[in-house]
Image: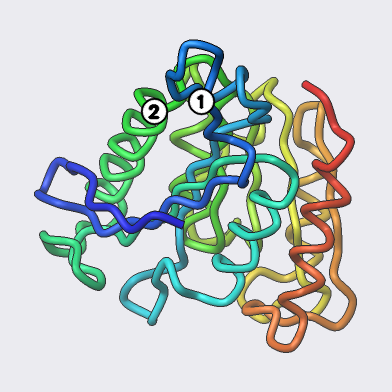
Amino acid sequence: MRVREITGPAGTLEALLDEPPAVAGVNEEGLVERGLAAGLRAAVVLAHPHPQYGGTMHTKVVYQTAKAFSRIGCAVLRFNFRGTGMSTGVYDEGRGEMDDFRAAIAFMRSQYPDVPLWAAGMSFGAWISSNVGATDSGITTLLGIAPPLSRYDFEAVRTSPKPKFFIQGERDELCPLKEMQEFYARAVDPKELVVIDAADHLFDGKTSEVADAIEDLFGDWNE
């Protein structure tokens, strides 16, 4: 894990970058190789839940998600939105946070220019990441964990032809499973949904099952 500050549109964004051990290698000329040359599957940008309700890049599900992606060979950048933790700026009702996410994408694109870019997020972060990812031609895959479908507009995500993965708690009190099932039924393929039994919105006591679901969904999946 590397602790970083990346440049955002409102100043610096506090960030953590997880890389699989095999990502950085040395070639025959003694030069460091990264990305596909070192076996990296994807570069993932991961967004946290609503900052005004305690969400940060250290939220348990975000942490477990980052570790799960790293275990299957992905580099993962999680970061604090503006005004959260050590990140500068103030909350901007989603507009600025989408710009923060775009800055994080640009950073990962510069670090790993030859690997697929995936967008992932939890709750409020799922809205940010999925909408930015659906409209960014460089993002190939979307993951939404407990997306708040009735609170924000997910139409661009629903109609996106990109592969879409969703992880939902069976007893999510903020994003009811029925809403997810109705949204999923109307979403454009390809898509896949995993429901975690008896899990609430924060997956309290079930965060390891979210990690397991990510490894199951993406472990053998090829774009």
Q: Quadrant of the C terminus?
A: top right
Given residues 5 and 147, the one toward you in this image is 5
Given residues 121 and 174, the one toward you in this image is 121
- Residue 108: x and y, percent? 40, 32
Name of the residue lying farthest toward the bottom: 205
Where is residue 143, by image quadrant?
top right
Q: Residue at image x 60%, y 56%?
A: 149
Image-based side of 114 in relation to 89, left or right: right
Look at label 1 and name its amino acid: Arg
Mark 2 neighbour class, 10 Å CA radius: few under 14, some 14 to 19, many 20 or more: some
Mark 2 and mark 1 lie on one chain; the one further toward the N terminus is 1
Mark 1 neighbour class, 10 Å CA radius: few under 14, some 14 to 19, many 20 or more: some
Look at label 2 and name its amino acid: Gln
Residue that numbered label 2 is attached to:
111
Mark 2–mark 1 contact, CB under 8 Å? yes
Q: Residue at image x 54%, y 40%?
A: 44
Residue that numbered label 1 is attached to:
34
- Residue 164: x and y, percent? 72, 36
Mark number displayed over residue 64: none
Q: Residue at image x 64%, y 67%?
A: 64
Image-based side of 28 in relation to 180, left or right: left
